[in-house]
Image: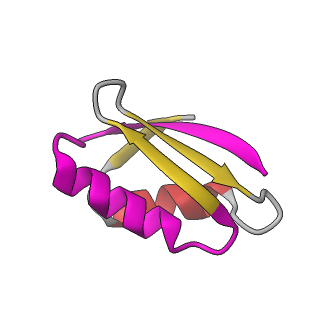
Amino acid sequence: MEKTILIVEGMSCEHCVRAVTNAVGALDGVGAVDVDLAAKTVTVTRDAAKAAIDDIKFAIEEEGYEVVGA
């Protein structure tokens, strides 16, 4: 498992945390999701062979947030 940190714009409350955590956590190969509102980051512990970064970014963007960096 490896950790990937993404910078995400648009998250501001606990609803945002739940939405991102649930969307990313549902992906195959994702072990853990940690959202830090103050730092605007989403840290994902993942099996790189199963959970591609592009799939994680897509899941976040489908919830209405913008991934601006990794």
Nearer to us in this view, 18 or 49:
18
* Residue 48, quarter of the rendered image: bottom right
Give the image location of residue 54, x and y in percent.
Answer: 61, 58
Residue drawn at (17%, 40%) of the image: 12
| Residue 18 among magenta residues | yes
Q: Please, which residue is most extreme toward the top here?
A: 39
Nearer to us in this view, 32 or 65:
32
Give the image location of residue 32, x and y in percent.
Answer: 57, 55
Nearer to us in this view, 60 or 44:
44
Give the magenta-colored segment's residue range.
1-30
Q: Is residue 34 above or below residue 25?
A: above
Q: Is residue 63 above or below residue 28?
A: above
Q: Tell me the quarter of the image containing the C terminus.
A: top right
Q: Is residue 59 above or below residue 16?
A: below
* Residue 64, quarter of the rendered image: bottom left
Give the image location of residue 16, x and y in percent.
Answer: 23, 53
| Residue 46 among magenta residues | no
Residue drawn at (55%, 59%) of the image: 56
Count of labels shown?
Answer: 0
Residue drawn at (24%, 43%) of the image: 11
Give the image location of residue 23, x and y in percent.
Answer: 41, 68
Q: Is residue 46 above or below residue 55?
A: above
- The coloring applied to the image is secondary structure
